[in-house]
Amino acid sequence: MSDSEEEESPDRQLKLVVLGDGTTGKTSLATRFAQETFGKQYKQTIGLDFFLKRILLPVDLEHMRTVKADKHQRFCQENNFSSHFVSAKTGDSVFLCFQRIAADILGIKLNKAELEQSQRVVKADIVNYSQEPVTRSVNPPRSSMCAVQ
Ligand SMILES: Nc1nc2c(ncn2[C@@H]2O[C@H](COP(=O)(O)OP(=O)(O)OP(=O)(O)O)[C@@H](O)[C@H]2O)c(=O)[nH]1
């Protein structure tokens, strides 16, 4: 048993540097992660910018450690690459990306539930048009086509 709560979950500050050519989306990625916003308008960063975000990571997962790896992950691991598919616009996997990077740096293994928690689930109703009467309308109501929750 440890002496204090702080010893069990110490605050660690990580500094991540996002590098890349101009207009490749570095600022958008950082603002999506830190502020949950996305701006379509391009404003060039002069010099550098700082963003701060506090995240929680599991601190003791040794007993849950599992080995999961497909070809892609294996290739990245063997070559010491970190691989992420993200969109600053939709927010897809942005939080997950930074969470994984931070976890990697701290040597923390995230389990499946924790990884899936960061992924947004989009649900849609599929309409069977072949059974619906054909009506020709100039502006059909969009809500009758797809419901996104
Ligand atoms: N559609 C789409 N546009 C994006 C995405 N990420 C960035 N953009 C757009 O790309 C443009 C450049 O994005 P920035 O985030 O400013 O790029 P940057 O790398 O910080 O640019 P510099 O300041 O020149 O270094 C902006 O107009 C963004 O709206 C994305 O995931 N999807």
Image (spheres, helix red, strand yellow):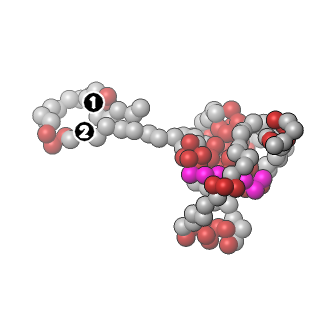
Residue 27 screen position, x and y as percent: 71, 42
Asked if ligand 1 lies within 8 A of label 1, the reply is: no
Does label 1 or label 2 sit earlier along the sequence? 2
**Residue ID for mark 2:** 127
The magenta stretch is 106-112
Residue 40: name its quadrant.
top right
The image quadrant where one finds ligand 1 is top right
> Of the residues shown, which amino acid type is indicated by label 1?
Ser
- In the foreground, 15 or 110: 110
Q: Are marks 1 and 2 in contact (CB under 8 Å)?
A: yes
**Would residue 58 be seen by someone viewing this image from the given angle?**
yes
146 w.r.t. 12: above or below? above
> Of the residues shown, which amino acid type is indicated by label 2?
Val
- In the foreground, 146 or 105: 105
Left or right of residue 57: residue 1: right
**Residue ID for mark 1:** 144
Residue 31 screen position, x and y as percent: 69, 37
Q: Is residue 110 magenta?
A: yes
Residue 1: name its quadrant.
top right
Q: Secondary structure at mark 1?
A: helix
Q: Secondary structure at mark 2?
A: loop
Residue ID at (67%, 39%): 33
Residue ID at (82%, 46%): 14
72 w.r.t. 119: above or below? below
